[in-house]
Image: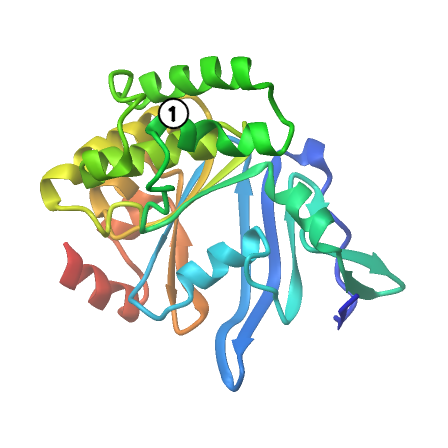
Amino acid sequence: MTELIVPAQTGAPAAESGLMVRAEQVHKAFGPLEVLKGIDLEVRAGEVCCLLGPSGSGKSTFLRCINHLEKINAGRIWVDGDLIGYRERGGKLHELREKEVAAQRRSIGMVFQRFNLFPHMTALQNVIEAPVLLGRDRKASARERGAALLERVGLGDKLGAYPGQLSGGQQQRVAIARALAMQPKLMLFDEPTSALDPELVGEVLDVMKDLARDGMTMIVVTHEIGFAREVGDSLVFMDGGVVVESGAPREVIANPRHDRTKAFLAKVL
C-alpha cells in the first residue's frame, strides 16, 4: 500500500460533533504543478457549502479529493468521522485498498459537469445499475426506488427514455437520481449546470434546492451566484489553490473583504 507521511495533526472529528466533512491542510500536485496548497474546510451535516473561484483555482480537484478520485499528497480528509482513502498507523497514512476506498465512496454521491450516463440504458436502468450491481438492493425494490427518485426529479414519465432522447437538463436530473440511488450521506456537485443551455439551468437548480430543503449535505462547485446566495449555508472562495475568503454567502457576496474576491465577483455578477 502507498505510504503518505504527514506531520502530526489533531485527531479525527467525532461523528457526534455534527461535522460531515473536515479537511485539514490538503495538498495536491500533478507533477511539478501544485494545485492545492493547504486547504482547510469544515461542513456540518445538513449544510450546503458552495465553492466559488476562477477556472484553475483547484475547486474541482478538491472536490475529487473528498471521495479519493484524486489522491492527496499531504493533509487529511474525513467524511462523517471516517478518514478517507487512508488508514493511520504511527503518524503515517497508508492508502486503503481499492475495495475499501470503493466502500467509502458508496456513501458519497457525485454529479459531474458531463452527465456520464450509459447511452444504451434507459433512465431507470441508469439509476438502478449501481445499487443492483453492488448488491445494495434487489432488482425489484431497486426499480421501485429508482422510479420514485426519477419522479422526485420531475422525470416520472421518462423511465423508459434513453439519454439520447433527453435534453441536457433531463440527463443531469437522471444523473442526480442515479447518485441518490446509493442513499448517500453527502452529495458533491462539480459545476452541474455548466454544460447546460441557459434555459435548462433552472430545472437542475430546482432539484438541488429541493435536496437542500430535505437536509442533504452538499458541497457544490458552481458559478451560479444566485444559487449560492439563496441556498448556501457557507461560501468558500478559492484562488490559486488556497481558500482566499469564506463566510455566509450573502455577506461574502455583498461585502467581500479580499481584493481578489471583489475582482472575481465584479466579473460574474
Is any part of residue 184 visible from this angle? Answer: no
Please say if 91 is above or below 16: below
Please say if 144 is above or below 133: above
Q: Nearer the viewer, residue 139 or 148?
A: 139
- Tell me which residue sits at (28%, 58%) in the image: 256
The residue tagged 1 is 124
Q: Is residue 213 left or right of residue 32?
A: left
The mark tally for this picture is 1
Q: Amino acid at mark 1?
A: Leu
- Tell me which residue sits at (32%, 16%) in the image: 151
Q: Where's the C terminus, which quadrant? A: bottom left
Image spot of residue 94 (x, y percent): 79, 63
Image spot of residue 208 (x, y percent): 33, 32
Helix, strand or loop for disc 1: helix
**Farthest residue in the bottom direction?**
32
Q: Residues within 10 Å of mark 1 (few under 14, many from 20)?
A: many
Image spot of residue 236 (x, y percent): 40, 54
Q: Nearer the viewer, residue 235 or 73?
A: 73
Is any part of residue 65 visible from this angle? Answer: yes
Q: Nearer the viewer, residue 207 or 42?
A: 207
Q: How is the image coloured?
A: rainbow
Q: Nearer the viewer, residue 17 or 127?
A: 127
Please say if 123 is above or below 168: above
Q: Where's the N terminus, which quadrant? A: bottom right
Image spot of residue 75 (x, y percent): 66, 65
